[in-house]
Amino acid sequence: MKDRLTVHPDDCAAFAIAGRVPTVVASPKSFEQAAAALQACAREGARVVIRGQGTKSAQPPAPAALDVVVDVSSVAKSIYIRADDLTAVASSSVRIADLRAALTAKERFFPCDVPFAADATVGGALAAGSNGALAARFGGLRDNILGMRVALSDGSRAFAGSHVVKSVAGFDSHKLFIGSRGTLGFIGEAVLKLAPIPPDERALVARFADPQNACAAALDVAAAPVFPYAVTLHCPRSAQRIAALTALTRPDEWLAVYRFGGLRRAVGRAVETVRQTCAQHGCSATDVLDRGGVERAWVDIAELAGGRMYPATGWCAYRIACLPSEVPSVLAAAAAAWPALEISAHPTMGVVFAHVPADVAVDAPGLWRSVGAAAGSAICTSAPPGRTDFAMPPRSYAPYALFRRLKSEFDASGTLDPGRMLGAV
């Protein structure tokens, strides 16, 4: 009996997405059961949402139709670490926090600061494409996933990619599933590329009166041979949410946080170089965090960008992408559209995170025009159920034809969450 698919319709209300309640919730216990569940739903013409822990369920648009939620949080969990090869294989139901603990015991880490780490699963993080600030040094999820085992809606199962770091065989088709929001198939397990935990880690916290000077300093640092792990920028309101930095936060100053890792002497030289660069751009003061301070601060920094601290019941969240040189313009445009917003940014990657109280009047089309002028794009990553005035209009030049082709190839029956890819594909 334990190998049979478990269905518990009485729990459906707890799995509602954007106010839509499924009629059936299926909880497979294995990758094979998940594939069978998808195949059965496709055969019956049901519309399916694949759900891990549901940490990204608030991202619009709402499902066009919802019959079945395939809850994969109960799929068997496993982590196999090849410490010497700097790789690991993790099933999709493994929580990010559990993965980090297992890797730390082997003196390794997965170099992607995924938000919602306490609850989010490996599969959910990959499906959501949840990149963090460490992407500036280590690359994003697409760069750190070597292979993937997937199941499609027709019940077929496949492995794409490789189990080793150096491989040129085949196509990297597994990368299509990263950020696909479960619309192409179910991610069963992933092969992760790891990095060794550095001997020393520190962070330089620099205070600026305005974000323009902070961005200019960040770009100068990016052009210098100091190679920080990450750079983040926070407005005074968002900086107050970083517990490890609360004592450093001033109500009228922006905080730029530079994270470093490596040999102790090299880290010391990098910190001093960045301190001088910040001073040249009008930095009012700097502070240095040790390894413990970095670890405490980065938990909040990753959650800030991912929206964990801004629940969808009270906030709308946007992720805005632009050229790094245009970040100051985007910050100014966002502040003009929403004076009450809280904002963070990854200035050297050209990513801005804007969080707006849900009861604040918003000019989303105005922001869209301003962001467009700055050669950027934006998506709403979280909004209260039923709210549509925060939605951003689709970009005319987005490759929707390509999205439709991919959808038809991987999910020909249209079973998996139709309408939730960019452009309602």
Image (cartoon, rainbow, N blue to C red):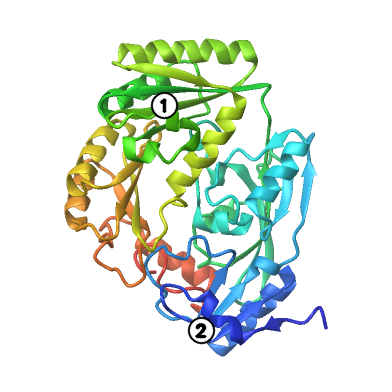
Name the outermost residue toward the right. Answer: 1
- Relative side of 233 to 369, left or right: right
- Residue kind at label 1, given as amino acid type: Leu
Q: Which residue is mark 2?
A: 67
Query: Residue 387 location, x and y as percent?
Result: 30, 68
Seen in the picture, residue 263 relative to 356 is either above or below; the reply is above
Q: Is residue 250 visible?
A: yes
Query: Residue 250 location, x and y as percent?
Result: 33, 29
- Residue kind at label 2, given as amino acid type: Asp
- Please state the total of marks drawn on the protein image: 2
Q: Quadrant of residue 278?
A: top left
Query: Residue 377 location, x and y as percent?
Result: 30, 49
Residue pictured at 33% horizontal, 57% vertical? 316
Seen in the picture, residue 341 relative to 127 is either above or below; the reply is above
Position of the N terminus, as image quadrant, is bottom right
- Relative side of 30 to 353, left or right: right
Q: Which residue is mark 1?
A: 248
Q: Quadrant of residue 261?
A: top right
Name the outermost residue toward the front. Answer: 247
Please say if the residues under marks 2 and 1 sit with CB atoms less than 8 Å apart.
no
Seen in the picture, residue 394 relative to 2 is either above or below; the reply is above
Of pointers 2 and 1, the one earlier in the residue sequence? 2
